[in-house]
Image (cartoon, helix red, strand yellow):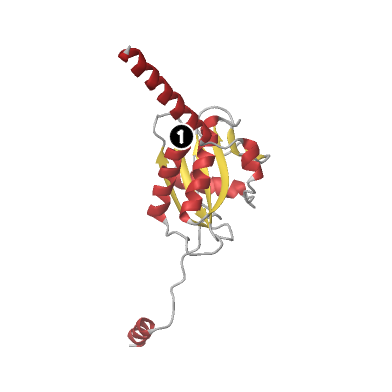
Amino acid sequence: MTFGFASSSAASLSTSASAASASRLLEPAEWAAAGIPLLRNPREVVSGLHARHHPKPLTAIVAVLDPDERLRASASFTRRTAPADGWMFRNALLAQLRRVIPHDLRRRTPVRTAVLLYCREGDARWTEEDGAWMWGLRDACTLHGLRCGAYITLTHDGWQVLGEDRGGRRPNAHSTPEPVATSEAPPLVPRTGGPVSDVLRRAAAR
C-alpha cells in the first residue's frame, strides 16, 4: 500500500508541475492584447542581430533598443534541450540582460525596449515553446525595468514577428549573415566639461 501511495503522489506532483509549466506561457491572443510596441523597421533589426550573432537553431538573442530603435546591447545563448518552461527562459534572459546592460528600475516609465529573436527548426507558426519565450521575455523585462518588445522567430522559411503579419524570407536559420550596416549603433560621444576635460585640453595644447 505504501508503494501504491508513493506512486500516486509522484504522479500528482508531476501533473502539478506540468500544469504550472503550462501556465507560464502566453497564447498569441494574450500577446497581441499586451500592447507590445511595433518595430518601425523589423527587417533592419533582424538583419543586424543575425549579422552580429550568426544564430543557428536553438539560439536565442536578446537585444535592447533605445527609443530611436538603435541597438544598445545584445547577447546570445543556446537553449538547453529541456522541456520549454517560461520561468527557466525568464531566468536565462534576465541573466543575459544583467550581464550586458544596467537595469532601468529607477525610471518611472521604461525607456529602452528588449526584443527577442529565437532561431529554431519548424515553420513560423506559434508553438508552446514560443509561448514560453514570450512569457519569459515579458517577465524578464519587468524585472529589469525595460519595455517588453517584439518576439521574432527565425526558421528555415525566414523570419516572422509573432503576433504581427510581418516577416521575410531572408535572413533565415541557414542563410549566410550579411555585413552589419545601418543598424550599427553610433559610437558614444565622450562627455565634456569638468577637471578631466581641462587636463586633456591643456595636454593637447602643449
Q: Alpha-carbon neighbours of circle 1 within 10 Å: few (<14), some, or many (≥20)?
A: many
Instruction: Residue 175: give x, y in percent of width and height.
Output: 51, 36
* 167 left or right of 84 in image: right
The correct choice, above or below, for 186 with respect to 195 in the image is: above
Q: Is any atom of residue 55 visible in this view?
A: no
User: Element at badge 1?
Assistant: loop
Instruction: Pick out the residue farthest to the left.
Output: 2
In the rendered image, which residue does mark 1 sit on?
Answer: 85
Residue 166, percent across and down?
66, 41
Choose top left, top right, bottom left or bottom right for residue 159.
top right
Residue in the picture at 51% in, 64% down: 107
Closest to the observer, 95 or 43: 95
Q: How many marks?
A: 1
Q: Is residue 125 left or right of residue 194?
A: right
- Using the rendered image of the protein, determine whether residue 102 is visible from the camera's viewpoint: yes
| The residue positioned farthest toward the front in the image shown | 1
Point out residue 33 in the picture as x, y percentages from the top left corner: 66, 44
Nearest the camera: 198 or 81? Answer: 81
Say which residue appears at 35% left-offset and 87% top-offset. 202
Residue type at mark 1 is: Asp
Above or below for 167 versus 101: above
**Quadrant in the picture for the N terminus:** top left
Residue at 56% across / 42% down in the picture? Answer: 151
Relative horizontal placement of residue 38, taking residue 94 as reference (left or right): right
Q: Can you give x and y, in whole percent of width and height, for residue 125 in the image?
A: 61, 30
Residue 198 sits in which quadrant?
A: bottom left
- The quadrant of the picture occupied by the C terminus is bottom left
